[in-house]
Image (tube, rainbow, N blue to C red):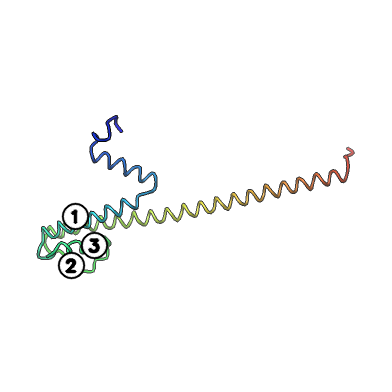
Amino acid sequence: MNGQPRAERPVRARLTHRAIIAVQNRRVFPYLVGVTALTAVATGLIAHLVDRKDFPTFGVGVWWAVVTLGTVGYGDVVPHTPWGRFLGSVVIVCGVTFISFLIAIVTSLFIDTNRADEASEREARHAETIELLRALDARLEALEEHIGPRNT
C-alpha cells in the first residue's frame, strides 16, 4: 500500500486497509462486535469520568452504554448533564448504526444462502435434463437401428 513497508504505514491506513479487506471478504461481523465492545467500555469510562452523579461507577457507565448501544434504553440510568446527554447522543447513533449493519449482514447471508441453494437446484435440474437427453438420444438410435436405413 503506497509502497511503504507495513511498519511505516500509519495506523489509520492499516485499519482502513483491513476494514476494506473485511468488507470484501464479508467478515465484518467480528469487527462490528469489537468496535461495539470497545465503544461500550470507552463510553462507560467517559460517562463515569464526566458525570459521577449519574454514573457513580465504571460498571454503571458500561451498563448504560451497552443498553444505549443496543437501543434498549431501560431508563434505569439516565444522563442529566449536558456532556452526559451529548455522550448519550453519540452512543445512540453508534448503536443504531451497529444494528443497521448487523441487519444488513444477516440479510445478506440469507440472500447468499438462498442464491447458492437456487444455483445447486439449477445445476441438478440441468444435469437431469442432460441425462434425459442422452437417454432419449440412445433410444432414438436404437429405434433407427431397428427400423433400418431410411429410404428418402
Mark 2 and 3 residues: CB-CB less than 8 Å, in contact?
A: no
Label 2 residue SS: loop
Tell me the amino acid under the disc marked 2.
Val
Determine whether label 2 and label 1 are within 8 Å by CB: no
As drawn, the label of residue 113 is none
Number of marks:
3
Q: What residue is at 71 percent from the left and 47 percent from the top? A: 133
**Which residue matches tag 2?**
77
Observer-side mark, 2 or 1, equals 1
| Disc 1 target residue | 42
Instruction: Give the quarter of the image for residue 100.
Output: bottom left
Residue 70 picture location, percent across and down: 28, 62
Q: Which residue is mark 3?
A: 68
Q: Residue furthest right?
A: 151
- Which residue ends up furthest to the top in the rendered image? 3
Q: Residues within 10 Å of mark 3 (few under 14, many from 20)?
A: many
Whichever of labels 2 and 1 marks the residue nearer the N terminus, that label is: 1
